[in-house]
Amino acid sequence: MTPELILGLLLLIVGIAAGAYPRTRDYLDRLINVEIAATGLMLVLLSFNETISLLTFVAVTALATAVLIRVIERRSGI
Amino acid sequence: MIPVLVCAGIGLYAACRVVLEPETPRKLLYLSVLNFAVAGSIVLLVPDIMALFAAAAYFVGSTLESNAIASTWAGGVKRT
Amino acid sequence: MMEYIIAIFGIIALIGAFTTYLRTSPFDKLIGVAIMTGGVIPFVVIKGYLDVAIVIALVVPVTTIFMLQASRRGMR
């Protein structure tokens, strides 16, 4: 049980709770809350020494955020 | 190990001040203090020359992020 | 001595996560994400992956700038 694994699992639990039950029912708030869970999963991958997987996950998270922001803008800002 | 502890303590104090401030511009002031403390502790943690570049990259990225938040809060770029 | 430093950065990351969850304004939530990133990056550095730390420190602000594009539209 390294400190990275403990902190990563804790952040993952907080992020899942924040993504499932947000304070306000808004798309942008929920998307920002999902970022917490992504950071926790990144830390869990770090504790298992998976370097290539970590780099790929960070890049794919940025691309997915760009696509989802485009969708949210088109949906809510008519 | 004492300088790293001092830098981390300053970072913890700055994080507590960011959380307790009610207004957004004052939050950004203490957020920049937190960024300085973390960039200093990255250099002091690992005795390697590559840590200098990591601290420089973190400093550039966090300053860009903080300035983007401040610019958008103040109204953003006026579109002509 | 090293345990206290790790504990302090873990506390900073948890403070960022909880203030991201509990605030309701988008700007305050993005400031919380910035605090959490500042707490997580030293764990990557202590582990020894400095190139991964460089990539994370340069990719996360791009994500924040993408989110700011939508928050300006919703605010005004």
Image (cartoon, coloured by chain):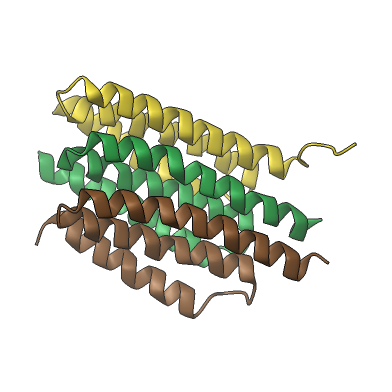
Chain colours: A brown, B yellow, C green
Quadrant of the rendering where the C terminus of chain B is positioned: top right
Q: Nearer the viewer, residue C29 or B12?
A: C29
Q: Nearer the viewer, residue A43 or A72?
A: A72
Q: Is residue A55 left or right of residue C58?
A: left
Total label count? Answer: 0
Check the image and name the residue furthest to the right: B80
Q: Is residue B16 visible?
A: no
The structure residue drawn at horizontal position 28% and vertical position 21%, both measured from the top left corner, is B52
B43 up-or-down from A68: above or below: above
Residue A58, given in percent of the width and then of the height, sits at: 38, 52
The structure residue drawn at horizontal position 17% and vertical position 55%, both measured from the top left corner, is A47
Classify residue C54 by image quadrant.
top left
Quadrant of the rendering where the N terminus of chain B is positioned: top left
Q: Is residue B14 left or right of residue C69?
A: left
Q: Is residue B63 visible?
A: yes
Residue C20, given in percent of the width and then of the height, sits at: 49, 60
Q: Nearer the viewer, residue B45 or A53?
A: A53
C43 up-or-down from B62: above or below: below
Residue A67, given in percent of the width and then of the height, sits at: 59, 60
Q: Is residue A4 left or right of residue B25?
A: left
The structure residue drawn at horizontal position 57% and vertical position 55%, both measured from the top left corner, is A66
Classify residue A36 by image quadrant.
bottom left
Q: Nearer the viewer, residue C32 or C68?
A: C68
